[in-house]
Amino acid sequence: MVSEYNNPGSHKYFFIIALVFSIIVLIPMYVLVIIAFAVPSQTIAAYYPSLIPTKFTLSNLMHAFSGYSSILEAAFIKSLITATIVGALAAFLGFHASYGLSKLPVRLSSLIISVLFFSTMIPSLTIAIPISVSFLKAGLYDSALGLALAQELVVLPMTIFMITGTLQSLPKQIELQARVDGAGFFQSLYSVIFPLALPGVLAAFLLSWMMSWDEFTFAIILSPVHPTLPILIYLDSTARGNILYASAFSLIVTIPVILITMALSKFIKGNYMASGLTG
Amino acid sequence: MTVKLELKNVTKIYGKHKVINDLSLTVEQGEFFVILGPSGTGKSTLLKMMVGIEQPTSGKIFIDGKDVTKLPPNKRNLAMVFQNYALYPNMNVFNNIAFPLRMHHRTNISQRVREVAEKLNISDILGKRVNQISGGQQQRVALARAMVRKPAMFLLDEPLSNLDARVRFSARAELKRIQQELEQTFVFVTHDQKEAEALGDRVAVLNKGEFQQIAPYKELYENPANPWVGDFVGDFPMNLVDGKGFRPEWASVGSGDYSMVVESMESIGDVSFIFGSDSNGEHIVLRAPEKYPIGTTVKYTVNRFKDFGNQP
């Protein structure tokens, strides 16, 4: 696939845009890092905090972790479980729903997908309260599974939209060929279509995972007793006023996202599946 | 001869559009059967009904005497090669060829794959990804995948049309050789009459969902069933004069009762064809031993006619 980015001229512009975006993203990260590692007298305790601190220490982090490790660990594990359930469920449900939608005429499937997005138009806060009532009855309140199910509401339409696009771009003959070659319906679905849709499914998994990882509204209402990481950070930086702890925890929130993105990006950007097919 | 494939009064309707209209057909065991027709005439739909991807609106399909009309593709024991080869892009060449064997729970998969690869001269690319090989190689891989399972018959949907002219020529010869070696039934769909001529034991000419004629190519050319077939088959449309048709080589140029005005000319090797119109405005193509300047009137004699009677 020859994209315009292979052209050296436009490559330059792409680089500039990427640089600007990187700066926008990296400045807050930088502030986070210096608060976490510089001595407090140069950052949060200073009247005029320095952007370029000169004295560094690990004691901020040590304090945050030592005084707090069990709560932090619990929050981390809860966030991890919740996000993984959300991602896995989104990939599983999204793939099957999208397969069905990809068989419909494009006009009809686009209509159904837009209807799915209606659910995301309602503010989370409004539905979080009735959901929490139902969850209290069902015993899902304050559980990772309950929170994951609520967050799934938000991510599923986007997931289906993404995977349907991937499936619609696959040549129809591949599936027909699998059937002629002797594959039953489910065999062709899982041994031929699923591997081909994998980049889309992984992208959907990643996106859902990240949306859940820093999701706030449902988390604070549906899981306030044993909070997830974003709630813990919020409580530290506002209610408890402990910005040092909040910065340390924020770094912990960021690292898994970077790792998982790096791990999956190879599959997602790869157009390894696009060639070998014409028409 | 035993009948391999039989279509009985097959009709396919999409919405209000009748794509296939009451077709009946028998294909013999071991026959290379070509379905020839212009694009958009229902060729692929017909093939899809044979393989089981589409269901006929009415009519029945028999393979080896068994009614398969309602059977899904994986129960029909057929192999198909699509125009774009539909190789599984997530698998390498070996796994592509092995796929039908795995789906049918066969044993000795590796040995069988190597055997077929040997026959098609693709043993050296078994480890490659399908996007790393050339179009000609992709076509062989698709054919190998079709052959590997020893199916009841082969269905091929314009499998040569994506190849370069040179490769296509050798691939065509090879396809014919393989079909003769396997002694298997091939149903081959194409819009290219050179392929139909070179490959087909019999050729069915399809237009607007109906068979116009089913015969060996030579007979289609010499003795078309109707003026449409005469027009469609051949390098040049059959000339029509007074409701009778003739091929360029059936006329001799120089003298005679007929005449036309030369409008253009084309030389293929040492043969020249002259194009013109007669006094009724009919387009005429003649084979001429020498060149004629544009605008001259040429007299010719027709030595042989195909009489269409009162057919339209």
Image (cartoon, helix red, strand yellow):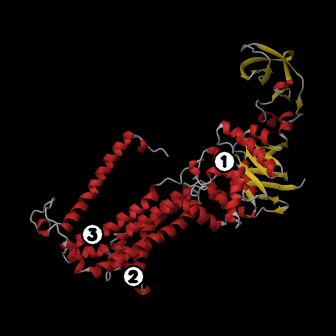
Residue A143 numbered tag: 2
**Residue A23, x across and y down, in percent:** 26, 54
Give the amino acid type for the residue marked by disc 1 in the picture. Gln
Q: Give B259 or B216, whichever is nearer the viewer.
A: B216
Q: Tell me how far mark 3 sits from mark 2, CA to CA.
A: 22 Å
State the residue position of label 1: B139
Q: Are discs 2 and 1 both within one chain?
A: no
Q: Give B217 or B214, whichever is nearer the viewer.
A: B217
Mark 3 closeness class: few <14, some 14–19, many ≥20 residues within 10 Å: many
**Residue B106, x across and y down, in percent:** 71, 66
Q: Tell me if A40 is positioned left or right of B242 in this view.
A: left
Residue at coordinates 59% horizontally, 60% vertically from top-left?
Answer: A103
Compare marks 3 and 2 and give the one earlier in the sequence.
2
Q: Tell me if A213 is positioned left or right of B157 in this view.
A: left
Q: Is residue A23 above or below residue B103?
A: above
| Chain letter for the residue marked with disc 2 in the picture | A
Q: Element type at marker 3?
A: helix
Q: Are marks 3 and 2 in contact (CB under 8 Å)?
A: no
Instruction: Tally the marks.
Output: 3
Give the amino acid type for the residue marked by disc 2 in the picture. Ser
State the residue position of label 3: A250
Q: Element type at marker 2?
A: loop
Q: Are marks 2 and 1 in contact (CB under 8 Å)?
A: no
Q: Give B50 or B176, whichever is nearer the viewer.
A: B176
Q: Is residue B156 visible?
A: yes
2 vs 1, front mark? 1
Give the amino acid type for the residue marked by disc 3 in the picture. Ser
